[in-house]
Image (cartoon, rainbow, N blue to C red):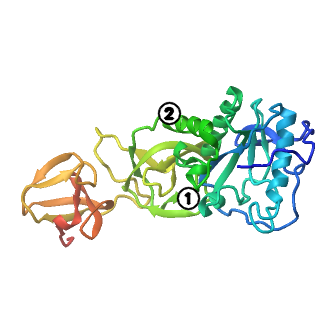
Amino acid sequence: MTTQESPTGTGKNTASPQISVAGIVMRDLRKSLPRRNRPIDTRSQPPTSITLHYNGTVVRNRSLEGELAQTVSNAHWHMKPYILSPDGGDGLQYHLVVFSDGSIAQTRDLEDTLWHCRHEEGNNMSIAVQLPLGGNQDATPAQWEATTRLFDELIARFGMAGRRRVLGHEEWSDSHCPGPRLMFRLMQWRDSEQFPAPRLYRVLYENANVRQGPGRIYPAALQMQPGEIFAAGHEVRGENIGGNDRWLHRTDELGFVHTSIVELVDADKSWQPPPSADGPEQSLRYLVLFDELHVRAEPSVDAVVVTTLRQGETLVANGLVSGETLGDSANWVALADPQGFVHEHLLRPLEQG
């Protein structure tokens, strides 16, 4: 939020270069706005959220020329000593600005860490989007449509966890920004998101990476093994691998998985071990330790019961998979005959021979 009204620069250069960010064509104002030559921090990881700001005080001239002049004024205001710090900021503290006519400008590099919401995570990991309006002013229809379209594209580009990761400044710290009208619009827009029901997926290959973002440039958060089951709520667009740019966002928010290395779990299809380059694995045999033992369709106590076993029966299995943790173990035995899953603590492995 900015409280300065009077521009100290003209802001009349409406013929600024055009760039494309997240698939949206916009003005590039990064080199035309006032800046102070001082080092700043940059983000090494992809942003995880977006923060909405407004101007605070009324913007009297809401023509494009007036709003460009206001943006120049805001940059000067942010550089004043003791406004953001004793020495002042290095320039405008918003990455993107959306004007009343629906046009958008990039005003800072997206990886710049800016002082825009008085919150460590918000400053370090959030993209700041500002609308030059204030007081009781509201966004124009074209302005709000462009703003929400920008939000959706940034969410998809950086693999953020849906619209709930778009916050108002006031949700980070004690502030009235982005004002009651924009905050109401933001909450309505967030609430309108249709969350798909989570679906279960099965890993097909060894050492399958779960990435921190939707692409191989992002570090691996963990690795999965064949047969592991996980839930994903929705797909996002990311790095294109083999003609496929769809990535699954795990519902536990551990990261992203490329759709080519998993298969959708079909409730009507029995589990089969993934193919091995070394040929079929040797079958394992287990002894049932308890009577009325349930074999589950998935490695979880809440999964459908496939069949019931009796104490002393011997079983043929394909190996272990990761599932719901019981006691101190998340290992479940993937049975070949009968087909299904039983937690390892309920069985005893038999010597092979």
Vertical arrangement, residue 65 with respect to residue 252, above or below? above
Q: Which residue is drawn at 9% across and 63% down?
A: 290
Residue picked out by circle 2:
192
Q: Residue at x 90, y 42 (%)?
A: 11
Residue picked out by circle 1:
212
In the image, what residue type sits under mark 1? Gln
SS for dot 1: loop
N-terminal label among 2 and 1: 2
Report whether 35 appears left or right of 142.
Answer: right
Report whether 148 appears left or right of 193.
Answer: right
Q: Which residue is drawn at 54% across and 63% down?
A: 220
| Separation of marks 2 and 1 at Cα, in angstroms | 26 Å
Report whether 273 appears left or right of 75.
Answer: left
- Quarter where residue 5 is shown: top right
Question: What is the crowding at mark 2: few (fewer than 14 residues within 10 Å), some, or many (at least 20)?
Answer: few
Q: Position of residue 194 (x, y in %)?
A: 47, 34
Asked if marks 2 and 1 touch (Cβ < 8 Å), the reply is: no
Query: From the image, which quarter does the C terminus lie in?
Result: bottom left
In the image, what residue type sits under mark 2? Ser
- Quarter where residue 206 is shown: bottom left
Q: Position of residue 16 (x, y in %)?
A: 89, 40
Q: Where is residue 157 in the image (x, y as percent from the top left)?
A: 64, 46
- Residue at the farthest bottom position: 351
Q: Looking at the image, can residue 338 be seen?
A: no
